[in-house]
Amino acid sequence: MRNMLHGIVAVLFLSMALLSGQESDKLVRLESLDVSDNVYLLRGGGTNILAFIAEDGVVLIDTLGAGWGQATRRALDNLTSLPVTTIVNTHAHTGHSGGNGEFPLVTEIIAHEKTKARMREMSAFQDENVRLLPTKTFEEKLTLLEGFDRIELHYFGPAHTDGDILVVFPEKGIAYLGDLFGRMSLPRIDRDLGGSGLAYPLVLARALDEIKYFPAFVRGPEVRTFDRVVPGHVLPPDQTPLLRWLKWDDFKRYAELVAKAVEVVREAKARGQTEDQVIDLLKDSIAAEFPSYQLDAVGAFAEIVSLEIAEQ
Ligand SMILES: [Zn+2]
């Protein structure tokens, strides 16, 4: 596969669904993230996940939602007949964990301990479905596999939920950001699952500070500068993802956006401004300083941050 893909800028397989039943309309798009590596991006139903083809099985970084397992498998069949053996859940939302039970040879499901605690309370993981809960948890950092295959899981605190992790392939220059950086807009904060708008900028700052091997990293004798980040839901660019995919600098910029947004809300609330005024200020600030970001999540973000400030 490596030789076959060598020199091709972008690879796109479409796995067409021909099966009957409710999965028949589901299509998972599969893209190579780096033609010399075995990390792939899978996209279905508006969500991005990663698949890493290890020696003896596939590691999935998140699953798509419930009902997407067969379509995911059909996409993987373009690459390998190896079974999915390991799943990493970046957080508890079922859009990223609902497919945990749809890969029969999985031996390990890994998540942050707080994510497991949240999942344990969710209806999708009750009764016989307790077997779909993570089998292995960690607190701050966990490393999977070794050498060029190394995968690092990092936790920096509550943000989108209280258990979001970043998944880094340090030897490949790729990081999966899940819903910590989900879209080109302000983040969604799930307070019911322990998310926090006030803590969000701190979490992103810690991530940027502690994952120091990006963007330049050493692979064998080479210093490479691929520094691709994969957000949970941002639409992949058409064609040439290698050249146009989001970079670590885009993640830095996103961290600046979130920090700025919290600051704008904090200052406006300190001046006693109304919720509508806060939202208008926030929209103006983003439109002026971060024009590539959408404004759709501004209201919800302002509301939650205001609430957290009031609770302090
Ligand atoms: Zn989420």
Image (cartoon, rainbow, N blue to C red):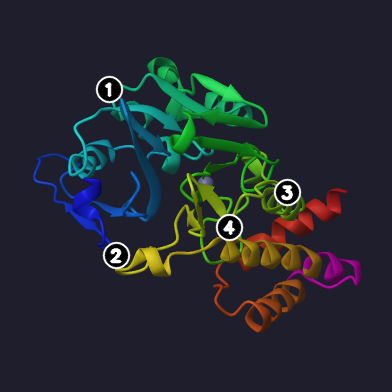
> Viewer-nearest of labels 3 and 4?
4
Q: Which residue is mark 2?
A: 9
Q: Quadrant of residue 50?
A: top left
Q: Which element is circle 3 on? A: helix
User: Is residue 270 one of those drawn in magenta?
Assistant: yes
Amino acid type, label 1: Pro
State yes or no: discs 2 and 4 in contact (Cβ < 8 Å).
no
Badge 1 crowding class, 10 Å Cα cut-off, few under 14, some 14 to 19, many 20 or more, is: few
Residue 282 vs residue 47, the one in the foreground:
47
Residue 246 percent coordinates (x, y): 48, 64
Q: Is residue 214 above or below residue 243?
A: above
Query: Is the distance from the Cβ of mark 2 to the nearest ligand 1 atom less than 8 Å?
Result: no
Q: Which mark is residue 206?
A: 3
Query: Is the distance from the Cβ of mark 4 to the nearest ligand 1 atom less than 8 Å?
Result: no
Point out the stretch of residues depicted in magenta.
265-275
Q: Which residue is mark 1?
A: 104
> Viewer-nearest of labels 1 and 3?
3
> Viewer-nearest of labels 3 and 2?
2
Q: Residue at x 59, y 80 (%)?
A: 291
Residue 237 percent coordinates (x, y): 37, 68
Q: Which mark is residue 215?
A: 4
Which circle's residue, 4 or 1, is located before the other in the chain? 1
Query: Is the distance from the Cβ of mark 3 to the nearest ligand 1 atom less than 8 Å?
Result: no
The N terminus lies in quadrant: top left
